Image (cartoon, grey):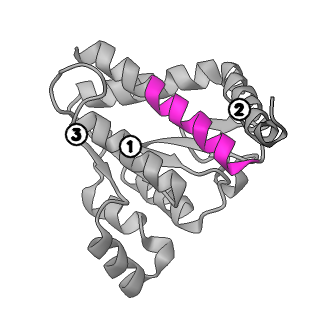
Amino acid sequence: MAESQQPMIESIERSIQTITSLTSHVDAIEQACELVVDALLAGKKVLTAGHGGSAADALHMAEEFVGRFVNDRQSLPAIALVADSTLMTCIANDYGYDELFARQIEGLGQTGDVLVIFSSSGNSPSLKRAIEMARLKNMHVISLLGKGGGPITGQSDVEIIVAGEETARIQEAHTVVLHIILEAVERQFA
């Protein structure tokens, strides 16, 4: 092995270790799957949110529900709250960045819907406000977090706090969890 390859191997090994740590969260992952499946069976929708790379996870999850993940099935209602740049800049400008998701949930969220947030740190005031608004709207909340969960810890129906401090590895684990949720949905709606 070339010396230049060692950092790559170390990144792969850290990723494997972080993803393997998800086995300690199987109960919470199963609860998340059940919340999402039950909501969709009841005709409710899934709203997703996150910042930066976690916004990409939010987009990824929503598009797989509306489009498809692996198998052909009916389209399912999901909205990524990070998808509309004009709406996001309007809210940030008029109400402040902390209201970015809460304002959308106020207008779009309904009793029984599910909010799924992605945050590698749990430190985002706008995600904290999103959870507060979701609670006011009688929605369920699933939080995929990392780095100990931050101030968001303890505010969701289901929390999956990925072990580790490395943002990239946490986001990789979040992708595994969102794929597991999608697989559970597709088993139900196939």
Q: CA distance from mark 3 to mark 1?
A: 14 Å
Callout 3 secondary element: loop
Q: Is residue 160 magenta?
A: no
Q: Is residue 173 magenta?
A: yes
Tell me whether the residue at label 3 lies in contact with that at label 1, contact meaning CB atoms closer than 8 angstroms: no
9 or 76, nearer to the observer: 9
Kindly identify which residue carries mark 1: 60
Callout 2 crowding tier (Cα within 10 Å): few <14, some 14–19, many ≥20: few
Foreground label between 2 and 1: 2
Residue 132, position in %: x, y? 50, 58
Q: Residue furthest bottom?
A: 94
155 lies above or below 37: below
Q: Chief secondary structure of the magenta span? A: helix
Kindly identify which residue carries mark 3: 77
Residue 156, position in %: x, y? 56, 43
| Highlighted range, magenta | 166-180
Kindly identify which residue carries mark 2: 12
Q: Quadrant of residue 99?
A: bottom left
Work out whether mark 3 precedes mark 1 in sequence or the reverse, and give the earlier one: 1
Q: Quadrant of residue 128?
A: bottom right
Callout 2 secondary element: helix
Q: CA distance from mark 2 to mark 1?
A: 22 Å
115 or 6, nearer to the observer: 6
Q: Residue furthest front?
A: 2
- The amino acid on which the numbered mark 1 sits, given as a three-letter code, is His
Q: Residue at x 64, y 53 (%)?
A: 152
- The amino acid on which the numbered mark 3 sits, given as a three-letter code, is Pro
